Image: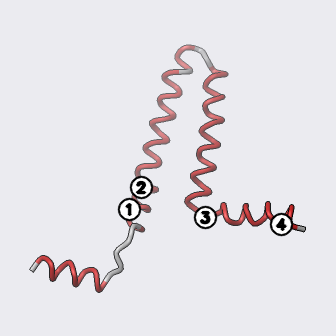
């Protein structure tokens, strides 16, 4: 009975990871960003090391740019543009 239900589900709807990916983008990523922000404020700003905090924030911006390129698929367009600069 269960095998029949799973087989029927697999036939009607294509199984994939789209739902998990959207859930992670909507829930896990903002929670991680909030956690990193709180840790930066607690560890760095509490000691008065504002320059250290800003260095870490710069690294976080780079990491966010990489995540954005990976999620949107924009890396392909950037790679094509860079190749066109040198390809002639």
**Residue visible at 12% across and 76% down in the picture:** 2
Between disc 2 and disc 4, the foreground one is 4
Q: Do labels 1 and 3 touch, CB within 8 Å?
A: no
Q: Earlier in the sequence, mark 4 or mark 1?
A: 1
Decide: few, some or many residues near mark 1? Use Cα within 10 Å; few <14, some 14-19, many ≥20: few
Mark 4 or 3, closer to the camera: 4
Distance between mark 4 and mark 1 Cα atoms: 35 Å
Q: Distance between the residues labelled 2 and 4?
A: 34 Å
Q: Mark 2 points at which residue?
A: 24
Inter-mark Cα distance, 3 to 2: 17 Å
The local crowd at label 3, few if under 14, some if 14 to 19, many if 20 or more residues have their Cα within 10 Å, is: few
Marks 4 and 3 close (CB-CB < 8 Å)? no
Q: Earlier in the sequence, mark 4 or mark 3?
A: 3
Picture colour scheme: secondary structure
The residue tagged 1 is 20
Tag 1 secondary structure: helix
Residue under circle 4? 84
Give coordinates of residue 87: x percent, y percent: 86, 66
Between the C-alphas of marks 4 and 3, the distance is: 18 Å
The quarter of the displayed image where residue 6 is located = bottom left
Q: Which residue is tagged 3?
A: 73
Alpha-carbon distance for marks 2 and 1?
6 Å
Residue at the far right in the pictured view: 88
For marks 1 and 3, give the CA distance.
17 Å
Mark 2, secondary structure of its residue: helix
């Amino acid at each position: 009975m269960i095998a029949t239900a799973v087989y029927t589900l697999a036939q009607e709807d294509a199984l994939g990871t789209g739902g998990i990916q959207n859930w992670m983008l909507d829930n896990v990523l903002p929670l991680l960003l909030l956690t990193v922000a709180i840790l930066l404020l607690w560890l760095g700003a509490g000691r008065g090391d504002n320059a250290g905090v800003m260095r870490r924030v710069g690294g976080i911006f780079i990491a966010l740019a990489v995540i954005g390129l990976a999620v949107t698929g924009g890396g392909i367009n950037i790679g094509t543009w860079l190749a066109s600069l040198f390809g002639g």
